[in-house]
Image (cartoon, rainbow, N blue to C red):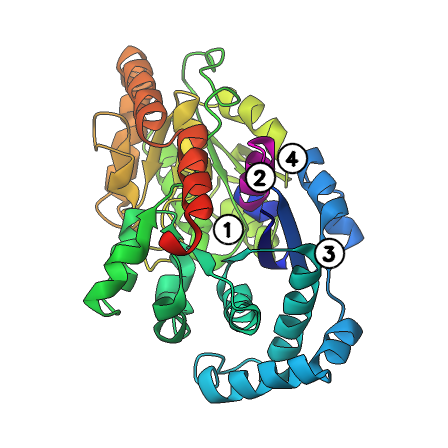
C-alpha cells in the first residue's frame, strides 16, 4: 500500500537522514510517495548526494497556485474550516490559510495515488499531514526531531491524540516532549535513531601520530553549534603547548567571524574551513583526523548530531559538550569524552592532551566507539523498525 511522506522542504543537504530513510524504505520494497512544498534551489541541488537528487526527481512538489485551487474546492473548504476550528493555536505564527491549502492539495494528490497512510517530518508538515489525514480518513504518523520538542512544540497537544505513532531520533527528546503530554501519549512513542551506515563509515587508515592533534568538526555555521567556543578551546590548547589543527566543514553566515576570531587568537593558520562537502566525502575527512569535536548548545537545538555517530563508527574519538542525548552513545572516558559544560575549556584541553600523550589508548577508545555505534545505532536495524511501524498503520 502506498505511504505518503509529507516533508515541508525536500531534499535538504543538512537533513540527509530523511533522504536515507525514504531511500532505505524503498529499497525494502515500500511504495513511498513524497509530497513537499519547497524544492531546493540550484545552489542547494549542487550540494545534494546522488541519492537525494534521485529522490528529488520522484517528489511531487505542491506549488502555491495548485494549493490555492485545492483550497477553493468543496473538500478544500472543509479542510480550511477544520483548520480554523482545531489548529489555530497550534499553527500560531503561520499563515493558516496557506497551510490548509497545502493540506487540501496533499489530500487530493494522496487520494489519487491510493495512499493509505501519511507520515510527516518536522512541525509544518506534521500540521499539514494532520489536516490531510482527517480529510482523507486515513492514519498518519510523524518523525520528531530534537529541535522541535523544545522550540516548536505547540502543535503536539492537538496532533498527538490522532497519531498512529511518533518516532523520535533520540531518547532525550522523547522524554522531554512526553513530560508535556498526557501519560497515554507514551504508548504511541518509539525510539528510532537515524542510524549510521556502518559499512560506509568504517575504521580507516590511521591519521598519523600527533603532534599535531588533528581535530574535525562539521555542521551549519550558526551560533547554536558553538564553533566559536571550539576555536577558543583549540587556541587555548595551542597556547598550552598542545599543537593542534582544526578543520570545520560547513557553511553559514558566521564563517568570516570564525576566521577573524581565529586570527585574533593567533590560531588563524591552524583553522581550516573548506566549506560544505558532500556526505559521501565525509569518511575521508574523518579518517584524516584523530578526533571529532562539537561544543554545541545544550538547549535541544541538537540532541546528538548524526555526524558525531558517523565519526564514532569510523573509530574516531568524539569530544562533545553535554548534549541532551550524548549519553545515549558515549560513555565518558571509555569511548569518548562528554565535557562538563559548553564552556569546559579545561576539560577539552585535557582530552586532546590525552590524545597526544597516549595514542594507543586513543585508538582503543575509537574502537570502543565503533562497537557502541554498531550495537545501538546501526541504520539498517532502525530502518527495519520504522518499516514495521509504518506497516502497522493505525495499530502503531
Label 2 SS: loop
The residue singled out by tag 1 in the image is 261
> Disc 4 marks which residue?
278
The residue depicted at 73 percent of the width and 39 percent of the height is 54
Disc 1, SS:
helix
Q: Is residue 57 left or right of residue 175?
A: right
- Marker disc for residue 366: none
Graded by Cα atoms within 10 Å as few (under 14), some (14 to 19) or many (20 or more), the crowding at tag 4 reads few
**Number of residues whose C-alpha sits closer than 10 Å to that of mark 2, classed few (under 14), some (14–19) or many (20 or more):** some
Which is nearer the N-term, disc 2 or disc 3? 2
State the residue at coordinates (24%, 40%): 327
Disc 1 vs disc 4: which is toward the camera?
4
Q: Residues within 10 Å of mark 3 (few under 14, many from 20)?
A: some
* Total numbered labels placed on residues in the image: 4
Compare residues 317 and 142 and report the one nearer the observer.
142
Q: CA distance from mark 1 to mark 2?
A: 49 Å
Q: Looking at the image, is mark 4 or mark 3 earlier in the sequence?
A: 3
Visible residue check, residue 173: no
Gap in angstroms between the C-alphas marked 4 and 3:
24 Å
- Rendered location of residue 167, percent (x, y): 38, 51
Residue 30's tag is 2
First of labels 4, 2 by sequence position: 2
Kindly report which numbered mark, 1 or 2, lies closer to the viewer in this rendering. Answer: 2
Amino acid at each position: 500500500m502506498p505511504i505518503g511522506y509529507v516533508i515541508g522542504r525536500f531534499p535538504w543537504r543538512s537533513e540527509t537522514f530523511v533522504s536515507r530513510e525514504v531511500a532505505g524504505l524503498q529499497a525494502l520494497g515500500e511504495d513511498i510517495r513524497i509530497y513537499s512544498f519547497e524544492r531546493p534551489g540550484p545552489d542547494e541541488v549542487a550540494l545534494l548526494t546522488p541519492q537525494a537528487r534521485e529522490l528529488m526527481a520522484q517528489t511531487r512538489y505542491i506549488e502555491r497556485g495548485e494549493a490555492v485551487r485545492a483550497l477553493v474546492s468543496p473538500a478544500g473548504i472543509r479542510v480550511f474550516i477544520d483548520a480554523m476550528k482545531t489548529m489555530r493555536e497550534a499553527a500560531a505564527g503561520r499563515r493558516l490559510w496557506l497551510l490548509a491549502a497545502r493540506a487540501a492539495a496533499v489530500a487530493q494528490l494522496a487520494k489519487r495515488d491510493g495512499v493509505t497512510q501519511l507520515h510527516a517530518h518536522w512541525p509544518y508538515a506534521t500540521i499539514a499531514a494532520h489536516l490531510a489525514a482527517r480529510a482523507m480518513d486515513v492514519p498518519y504518523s510523524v518523525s520528531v526531531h530534537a529541535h522541535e520538542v523544545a522550540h516548536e512544540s505547540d502543535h503536539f497537544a492537538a496532533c498527538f491524540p490522532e497519531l498512529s505513532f511518533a518516532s523520535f531520533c533520540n531518547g532525550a527528546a522523547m522524554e522531554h516532549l512526553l513530560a508535556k503530554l498526557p501519560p497515554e501519549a507514551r504508548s504511541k512513542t518509539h525510539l528510532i535513531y537515524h542510524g549510521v551506515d556502518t559499512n560506509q563509515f568504517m575504521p580507516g587508515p590511521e591519521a598519523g601520530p600527533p603532534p599535531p592533534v588533528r581535530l574535525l568538526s562539521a555542521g551549519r555555521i550558526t551560533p547554536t553549534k558553538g564553533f566559536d567556543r571550539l576555536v577558543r578551546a583549540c587556541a587555548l590548547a595551542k597556547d598550552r603547548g598542545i599543537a593542534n589543527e582544526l578543520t570545520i566543514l560547513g557553511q553559514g553566515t558566521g564563517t568570516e567571524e570564525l576566521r577573524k576570531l581565529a586570527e585574533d587568537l593567533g590560531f588563524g593558520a591552524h583553522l581550516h574551513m573548506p566549506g560544505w562537502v558532500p556526505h559521501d566525502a565525509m569518511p575521508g575527512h574523518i579518517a584524516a583526523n584523530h578526533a571529532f569535536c562539537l561544543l554545541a548548545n545544550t538547549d535541544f537545538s541538537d540532541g546528538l548530531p548524526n555526524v558525531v555517530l558517523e565519526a564514532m563508527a569510523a573509530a574516531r574519538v568524539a569530544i562533545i559538550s553535554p548534549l541532551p542525548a550524548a549519553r545515549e552513545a558515549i560513555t565518558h572516558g571509555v569511548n569518548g569524552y562528554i565535557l562538563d559544560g559548553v564552556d569546559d575549556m579545561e576539560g577539552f584541553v585535557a582530552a586532546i592532551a590525552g590524545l597526544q600523550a597516549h595514542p594507543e589508548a586513543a585508538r582503543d577508545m575509537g574502537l570502543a566507539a565503533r562497537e557502541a555505534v554498531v550495537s545501538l545505532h546501526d541504520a539498517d536495524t532502525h530502518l527495519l523498525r520504522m518499516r514495521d511501524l509504518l506497516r502497522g498503520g493505525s495499530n502503531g
